[in-house]
């Protein structure tokens, strides 16, 4: 008879979650602790296995609102109240530097808003503004713009506010699958409804005979498999006027807070510039050239496809 006592083994992730619990008990990280917390999420990602799902859920449920409440940004990411990650509301929170009004939670949001991902999202808004300025200046008689998976619409709203001298030359069509996102954008853009049209549709199913001087897609392609990426790229490129441009964003591997995002279930397909150019070549778009741009942080890359002028 074997009299040995079997002692349950601790999961490799347990000690990391215990350290994370200490941050919860302290009410979130202080700036001096940001690097330590980022490293901790990296450790959790490396140690996490399929068997750790329940441990992570139990941690989140006892996190005093940090990861189980929409009163923080990361809690919003974890809960996904609109049913999908990266929805219009969390993007708008990032654009507006939203921080929880609850003083016991606000330190979590200061950390969130200083993450490389949040900075990159805000920087792509500025990138969009530069594109709109260029197309408005190059088409003084008027330009047609398509905004794909348009989200909260704040990038366009802020452009209209800041560049009233150029905005009147643009007509922008929004295509967005989420009706709540369109409702939000419509309310935000009420002063400019004469310059925009909004349509609820799945971009893969959407059909139009219209052509555009600029097609902008900030945050859809890094949710797509390579096959869907190529399929949609080819479709959108076919809607661009000769001399016009299609620009799509994609997060790169320089996103140093990727594991922090993915802890909350916000998963993206990160691609580097070589991969983006390879997908462009695979799309086999006639009469087009491409190059890669990036926002100042180097986290969000942009594939530019220019249609030849005839």
Image: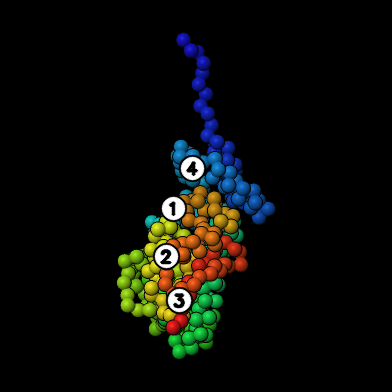
What percent of the width, then of the height, locates residue 220? 44, 63
Q: CA distance from mark 2 to mark 1?
A: 36 Å
Q: Which mark is residue 307?
A: 3
Element at label 4: helix
Q: How was this image coloured?
A: rainbow
Element at label 3: strand
Q: Earlier in the sequence, mark 4 or mark 2?
A: 4
Element at label 2: helix
Q: Which mark is residue 283?
A: 2
Of badges 2 and 1, nearer the viewer stands: 2
Q: Residue at x 50, y 64 (%)?
A: 277
What percent of the width, then of the height, locates residue 160? 49, 80
Q: CA distance from mark 4 to mark 2?
A: 40 Å
- Residue identified by numbered label 1: 79
Q: Which mark is residue 56?
A: 4
Q: CA distance from mark 1 to mark 4?
A: 13 Å
Of residue 242 and residue 144, the one placed in the foreground of this image is 242
- Circles 3 and 1, Cβ within 8 Å, touching? The answer is no
Q: Earlier in the sequence, mark 2 or mark 1?
A: 1
Q: CA distance from mark 4 to mark 3?
A: 48 Å
- Circles 2 and 3, Cβ within 8 Å, touching? The answer is no
Q: Quadrant of the C terminus?
A: bottom left
What percent of the width, then of the height, locates residue 31? 66, 55
Q: Earlier in the sequence, mark 3 or mark 1?
A: 1
Label 2 CA crowd tier, 10 Å (few <14, some 14–19, many 20+)? some
């Amino acid at each position: 008879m074997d009299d040995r006592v079997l002692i349950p083994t601790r999961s490799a992730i347990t000690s990391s979650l215990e350290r994370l619990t200490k941050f919860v008990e302290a009410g979130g990280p202080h700036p001096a602790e940001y690097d330590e917390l980022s490293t901790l999420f990296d450790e959790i990602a490396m140690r996490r296995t399929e068997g750790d799902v329940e441990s992570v859920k139990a941690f989140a449920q006892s996190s005093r609102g940090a990861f189980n409440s929409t009163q923080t940004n990361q809690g919003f990411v974890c809960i996904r109240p609109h049913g999908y990650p990266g929805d219009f509301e969390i993007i708008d929170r990032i654009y507006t530097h939203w921080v929880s009004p609850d003083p016991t939670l606000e330190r979590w949001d200061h950390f969130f808003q200083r993450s490389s991902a949040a900075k990159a999202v805000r920087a792509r808004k500025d990138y969009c503004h530069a594109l709109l300025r260029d197309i408005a200046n190059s088409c003084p008689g008027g330009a047609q713009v398509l905004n794909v998976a348009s989200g909260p619409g704040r990038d366009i709203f802020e452009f209209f506010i800041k560049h009233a001298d150029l905005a009147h030359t643009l007509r922008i069509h929004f295509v967005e699958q989420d009706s709540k996102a369109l409702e939000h954008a419509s309310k935000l853009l009420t002063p400019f409804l004469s310059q925009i049209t909004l349509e609820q549709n799945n971009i893969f199913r959407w059909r139009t005979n219209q052509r555009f001087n600029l097609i902008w897609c900030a945050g859809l392609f890094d949710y797509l498999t390579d096959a869907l990426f190529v399929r949609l790229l080819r479709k959108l490129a076919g809607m661009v006027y000769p001399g016009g441009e299609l620009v799509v964003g994609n997060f790169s591997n320089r996103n140093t807070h990727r594991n922090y995002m993915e802890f909350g279930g916000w998963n993206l397909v990160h691609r580097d510039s070589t991969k983006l150019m390879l997908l462009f070549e695979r799309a086999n778009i006639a009469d087009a050239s491409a190059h890669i741009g990036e926002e100042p942080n180097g986290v969000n890359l942009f594939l530019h496809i220019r249609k030849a002028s005839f």
